[in-house]
Image: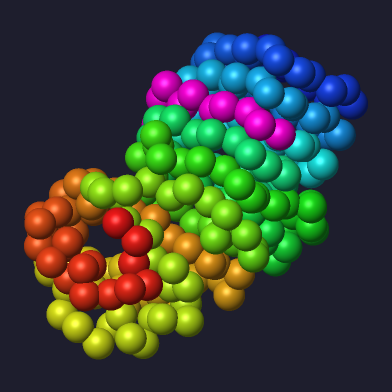
Amino acid sequence: MLYDKVFYEDQEIENERLELTDKGALYFLGANVTFKKCTLVLKVSARNLLIDEGTRFIDCTFEVKQELKNHQQWVFASLKGCRFKGRLSGCDFGYWPDYSDRAEHGSIEDCDFTEARLDGCRFHGGHTDTLRLPRWPCFTFLDPVGRALELRGVKWPGSFGEIVVDNLHTHPSSTQALTYDASAAARRFETTPEELRAVIEKFDCIVS
């Protein structure tokens, strides 16, 4: 399939609504482009959304109309004061320089995910305390690598403990927070949101 290529680079774009919804297009965001107070409507898969190093998003809103899965390229961008809406799974945000040489400038701070549904999404770097994370049915492990031993010390329902909690120590050391959607996790790991919540409430390092 031949894709149309849409480039946003070497410019500052302010107060615009950008519809990135054409499944026959590849959207290149970067390099050296700044989006300010823009609304970006996303309705394409991760392979159609390419973010390059040096891309900056300031006070932007992302309306995710189609679940965005396994999109790590957010770590190439600087995100400040942005709002996310919709479903994202397996995505990474923030400062994760070990991911790629191009990830040296990635950052995230003062962003709002309260209208998003996140599942298996990680936040890297040192500004997690400035984020507004989604509440229940989403829940977030804070410092999952550092608290891994403590979290393994209780029995988790279904296969969530065996597959997720027992492997928290294997995440990159830069991982400051890890968010799951209890409803989606319950389906995958043969349990219920209520059973998960009963364990989650025992820990002050889990936000829900």
Question: Is residue 182 positioned above or below 58 on the image?
Answer: below
Q: Which residues are magenta?
A: 58-67
- Please state the horizontal and vertical placement of residue 165, each as a whole percent of the image: 31, 73
Q: Quadrant of the N terminus?
A: top right
Residue 74 colored magenta? no
Compared across the picture, whether 122 is left or right of 7 comes to: left
Residue at x 33%, y 73% (from the top left corner):
204
Q: Nearer the viewer, residue 124 or 66?
A: 124
Colour scheme in the image? rainbow
On whether residue 59 falls in the magenta region, the answer is yes
Rendered position, 44 above or below 52: above
Observer-nearest residue: 188 or 186? 186
Image spot of residue 176 (x, y percent): 53, 67
Residue drawn at (56%, 59%), measured in percent from left and top?
Answer: 128
Quadrant of the image for the C terminus?
A: bottom left
The answer to whether residue 116 is above or below residue 192 is: above
Does 14 sit left or right of 147 as displayed? right
Percent from the top left, x then y, of residue 146?
48, 81
Q: Which residue lies at the image location 55% right of the left edge and 60% below the top edge? A: 129
Q: Is residue 37 above or below residue 100?
A: above
Q: Is residue 58 left or right of residue 144?
A: right
Residue 31 in picture, x, y percent from top left: 83, 34
Question: Does the image show residue 73?
Answer: no
Please indicate, yes or no, whether residue 121 appears anywhere in the rendered image: yes
Identify the image quadrant of residue 18: top right
* Majority secondary structure in the magenta region: strand
- Is residue 56 toward the left or the right of residue 198 in the image? right
Q: Residue furthest right?
A: 10
Q: Quadrant of residue 30?
A: top right
Count of marks placed on residues: 0
Q: Residue at x 39, y 66 (%)?
A: 141
